């Protein structure tokens, strides 16, 4: 059974600081997603990481994937209040020809002025 | 514009009542999924379907039923056997091959009254 674990689960930080969210998973997969969720809303796709060593950046967010270590990171640079949200990683799992996404628990990020 | 439409946005269920959540996509995606999200929690897979007239149970299928009579539609019925149905329900879809990622609907918030 695939397990996806994020840490930390809660993160409170000041504007202007840097921090990293970690996503570990237990089974081989070459496809990992990062999503953002605002309160009461659906998921917003941030990054799709498709291969070992993949790195993607958008604004103050950068995501990377190490399939050998089964680890993905989401790095926040010089945080701003607008980045306050819950962030999920999700791993694409193929079982007997069927695909499904398995989610981490989410990291609730609060950025204080 | 292509996308996934979930309806209704808010739904109230009385004790012992069955209710059906709608999910329609015009993306020509093969696979469709239902996830449940409880407050402050991650997303858990209820049911998924890779092709028409076929579907599989996810991790928390008890008390739920689905059908896939058309490629575009994947309705979820929350039956009276689901004792704690209050949650946020998200529908998603993806193409099986090639996979360009998952598209999520805007969600249905179900409350037991």
Image (cartoon, rainbow, N blue to C red):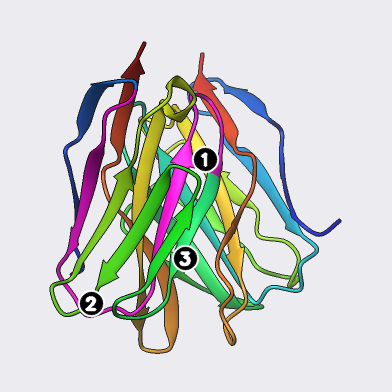
In the displayed structure image, the side of residue B63 where residue B103 appears, left or right:
right
The one of B63 and A29 positioned closer to us in this rendering: A29
Q: Position of residue B44 (x, y in %)?
A: 35, 50
Start-end of magenta stretch: A16-43
The residue that disc 1 covers is: B89
Cβ atoms at labels 1 and 3 below 8 Å apart: no
Looking at the image, residue B110 lies above or below residue B1: above
Q: Secondary structure at mark 2?
A: loop
Q: Which mark is residue A67?
A: 2
Please check the rendered image and state whether residue A17 is part of the magenta-colored stretch, yes or no: yes
Q: Whole-Å distance between the Cαs marked 2 and 1?
A: 30 Å
Q: Is residue B81 visible?
A: yes
Q: Nearer the viewer, mark 2 or mark 1?
A: 2
Q: Residue at x 63, y 26 (%)?
A: B11
Name the residue tied to disc 3.
Answer: A48
Residue at image coords 54%, 20%: B14
Label 2 crowd bin: few (<14), some (14–19), many (20+), radius 10 Å:
many
Q: Quadrant of the N terminus of chain B?
A: bottom right
Disc 3: CA contacts within 10 A as few (<14), some (14-19) or many (>=20): many
Say which quarter of the image contains residue B53: bottom right
Above or below, comparing residue B53 to residue B7 in the picture: below
Subunit ID for the residue under disc 2: A
Q: Going from the N terminus, do you reach mark 3 or mark 2 first?
A: 3
Q: Position of residue B7 (x, y in %)?
A: 72, 38
Q: Which disc is residue B81 wearing? A: none
Q: Nearer the viewer, residue A42 or A33?
A: A33
Does A92 sit above or below residue A34?
below
Q: Secondary structure at mark 3?
A: strand
Q: Position of residue A78 (x, y in %)?
A: 35, 32
Q: Which of the chains bears the disc numbered 1?
A: B
Q: Which residue: 58% across, 50% down?
A: B76
């Amino acid at each position: 059974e695939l397990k996806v674990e994020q840490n930390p689960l809660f993160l409170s930080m000041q504007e202007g600081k840097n921090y990293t969210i970690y996503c570990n998973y237990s089974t081989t997969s070459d496809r990992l997603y990062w999503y953002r969720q605002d309160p009461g809303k659906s998921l917003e796709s941030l990054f799709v990481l498709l291969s070992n060593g993949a790195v993607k950046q958008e604004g103050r967010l950068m995501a990377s994937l190490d399939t050998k270590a089964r680890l993905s990171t989401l790095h926040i640079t010089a945080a701003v209040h607008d980045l306050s949200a819950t962030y999920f990683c999700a791993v694409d799992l193929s079982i007997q020809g069927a695909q499904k996404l398995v989610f981490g628990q989410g990291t609730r990020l609060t950025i204080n002025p | 514009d292509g996308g996934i439409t979930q309806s209704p946005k808010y739904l109230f269920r009385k004790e012992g009542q069955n209710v059906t959540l709608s999910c329609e996509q015009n993306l020509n995606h093969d696979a469709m999924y239902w996830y449940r999200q409880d407050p402050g929690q991650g997303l858990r897979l209820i049911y998924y379907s890779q092709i028409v007239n076929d579907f599989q149970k996810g991790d928390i299928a008890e008390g739920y039923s689905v059908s896939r009579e058309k490629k575009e539609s994947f309705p979820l019925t929350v039956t009276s056997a689901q004792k704690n149905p209050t949650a946020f329900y998200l529908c998603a879809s993806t193409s099986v091959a090639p996979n360009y990622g998952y598209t999520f609907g805007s969600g249905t918030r179900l409350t037991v009254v």
